[in-house]
Image (spheres, grey):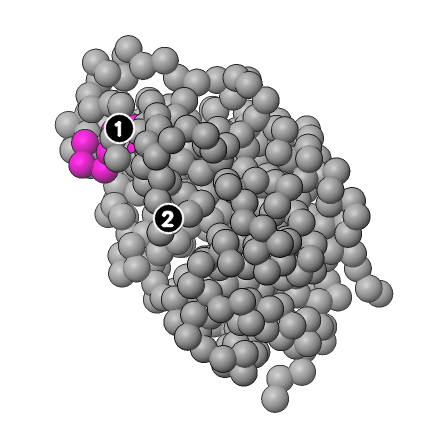
Amino acid sequence: MELTSRQRVLYTLTGRQPDMIPITEFLYSRPFYKEMIGYVPEVYNAEDIIKCSQKVGYDLAVIPLGGYSGMTNQDGKGYEYTDEWGIKYRKSEVTWPADAPIEHPLSNRNDWDNYDFPSPEDGDRTAEIRLAKKMAKETDMAIIGNIRGPFTPTWLLFGMTHFSMLMYDDPALIHEVMRKYTDFFIRGAEMLVDEGADAILFADDYGFNTAPLIAPAQFKEFVIPYLAEYSVKIKSLGVPLIMHSDGNLNSLIEMIFDTGISNYNPVEKAAEMDLAGLRKIYGSNKVFWGNINNKTTLVTGTPEDIEQEVKECIKAAAGGGHILSSDHSIHDDTKIENILALYEAGRKHGKHPFKFD
């Protein structure tokens, strides 16, 4: 039976075998937008994400909650701007669509005690997903609502240096801030689900290419309790939950999975994340997204190289859920022909039952 894109994604995220592997991409390539829809968006936005995704044939798109710091709806605010969280950003041609944080509003408890924390009810934070859901009906794409995890927004308030010192000097403060963000984004998830989100993805980067950003013991103390709460409360809304984190998570992934999180994006190959090894260790009840190398193969390879890596990736992930994509996103340096080759190879080789050469 041939499934719709939305059905295919939901089958995959809930542990059922779809007709074929879903394919998607985080669309951070301006040349690719130009090629697909004829123009380059000023900012990352739902309308252009859906247009481009539908033109390619992707099965899902990820749409952020309004107020996603450093990324959404900042057109017209100049080269530098301060967002609603008090974080100062500088626009960068290199990092589009994400802007670079250059100043942080807090450094200590006194700053926190006088900080006016935004509300998830401020403004219209679900306008983008409403538009995405309306547009997605044309091809029955799955629409994934995107929130933050507790870690990244907390360190962005203080800057990484102050954040790191406060884990030792005032750990209770770090917990207070993470508590506040957890409440904010769980409420945000509820709002996205109320507007029809098919699943929730929280983005919360935990790793460099070689190691975690903080020690595993600190991660267990400061982050894991809130991830466990994300897992319980968001899944209680009746939708799948996906974790996005770049980097080398080899020393963290077991405790993350122990919280009940079972969908992991993007399994970054350049950060020594071994898709076949993860499948062997954690078995069939985990869903992995990725992991075509967006640092090398997609940038410098040929379409034939892409097809070979797609086949290797599908084989590595076999035996459980898999969503095919790059191991992070497509960006301005990604060859357009390789982006399309990934999609075509995924459709060619991703049908169940798999037939490996």
Read off the magenta span: 156-162
Dot 1 falls on a residue whose secondary structure is loop
> Residue 120: x percent and y percent?
52, 21
Task: Tell me the CA gap for discs 2 and 1.
Answer: 21 Å
**In front: mark 2 or mark 1?**
2
Tell me, yes or no, whether the highlighted magenta stretch contains residue 157. yes
Q: Nearer the viewer, residue 176 or 50?
A: 50
Residue on which disc 1 sits: 104
Amino acid carrying label 2: it is Glu
Q: Is residue 161 left or right of residue 86?
A: left
Identify the residue at image location x=50%, y=54%.
30
Identify the residue at image location x=23%, y=37%.
160
Q: Which is nearer the N-term, disc 2 or disc 1?
A: 2
Q: Is residue 21 left or right of residue 32?
A: right
Dot 2 falls on a residue whose secondary structure is loop
Identify the residue at image location x=66%, y=77%.
349
Q: Is residue 143 above or below residue 175?
A: below
